[in-house]
Amino acid sequence: INTRKRCASNLSVYSRKRSTMSSIKQYGTVPEASKVATEVTMVQVKAPATLSAGYKFDAISNGQTFSVTVPPEGVTEGQMITVPFTPVAIAAEATPINGSIIGEWKDGLCGCCKFGCCHPHLCCACMCPVALMGQVLTRMKMTWLGNTARNEAEYRTTFRNTICVIIVCLLLTFIPRFEDPDPVWVRIEEGIKTPYYIREYPELPLWQNIVNKALNLSVALAPLYAFIVLVRLRRAVRKKYSIRDERCSSCEDCCCALYCGCCTVAQLARQTADYEVQRASCCTDTGLKPIPPVMTV
């Protein structure tokens, strides 16, 4: 009886091992990335010929081919029709963003001349770093204060608002201040044999003194604004590209923005754009020349 029990026990253990091995064979492989459909958007397609209702033809949008069905009223050659288009994205796969590698910077702080000494992003970083910061904020869909935008209307005005900050600071710098009154000579002769003169400096009226201090304070707040927003921007870029803060005791964002602001904003511009694919521009909201939408039939 004991022998039979041991045989039955060994048989059950062997059966469990076989079932476990079959499970490993069935589920041990890594699943491949699959295509998933995102939200439907409406695009315009140019009809290749005069077609009747129900006719189907292929169109390409952003490199993806999709089928277009001619509406009930039919189309004529060259007619623009609006049709639904469902973009397809690759799921379960970490892909580079703008040609960069997830988890690390494209280049270092000193890679400013990577695209040449006269590249628009470098010129903008040297002459007007706040403007380049506004362009990178727009790419990251952030407001001019360094916060995440709640809708498209907020981040579309980011570059314009940063330019307004620059203009206001320049105007405040060139506004003339109230000057101190000229000194006056006062004769002192009471209680002494030989009178003498002393120079007195009259004080500014209170309201003029307040205006001077307000103007000086406003100009001093401009660098503080640029520092705070740049720190927020760099933190957001690191989060998007999964880049760790490994230096300066977790104060890397603050140190880079404080000691090397121009190089920092230039690095962020290179990180958030692929200048080898899309040309740079100093006068656009994103610092990039717009690419016309791809639509062929």
Image: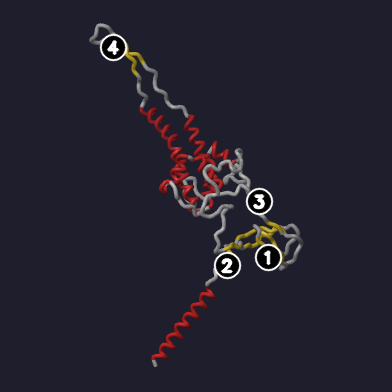
Name the amino acid, label 4: Ile
Looking at the rendered structure, the secondary structure element under dot 3 is loop
Give the quadrant of the C terminus: bottom right
Which tag, 4 or 3, sits closer to the chain's start?
4
Q: Check the image and report above or below for 258 versus 291.
A: above
| 163 left or right of 75 in image | left
51 or 14: which is nearer to us?
Answer: 14
Which tag, 2 or 1, sits closer to the chain's start?
2
Say whether residue 160 is visible. no
Position in image of residue 26 (x %, y %): 54, 75
Which residue is labeled 1 in the image? 67
Name the amino acid, label 3: Pro
Which residue is labeled 3 in the image? 292
Which residue is labeled 4 in the image? 188
- Give the crowd class for mark 4: few <14, some 14-19, many >=20 residues within 10 Å: few
How far separated are the C-alphas under marks 2 and 1?
26 Å
Q: Check the image and report above or below for 199 versus 244.
A: above
Which residue is labeled 2 in the image? 32
Looking at the rendered structure, the secondary structure element under dot 1 is strand
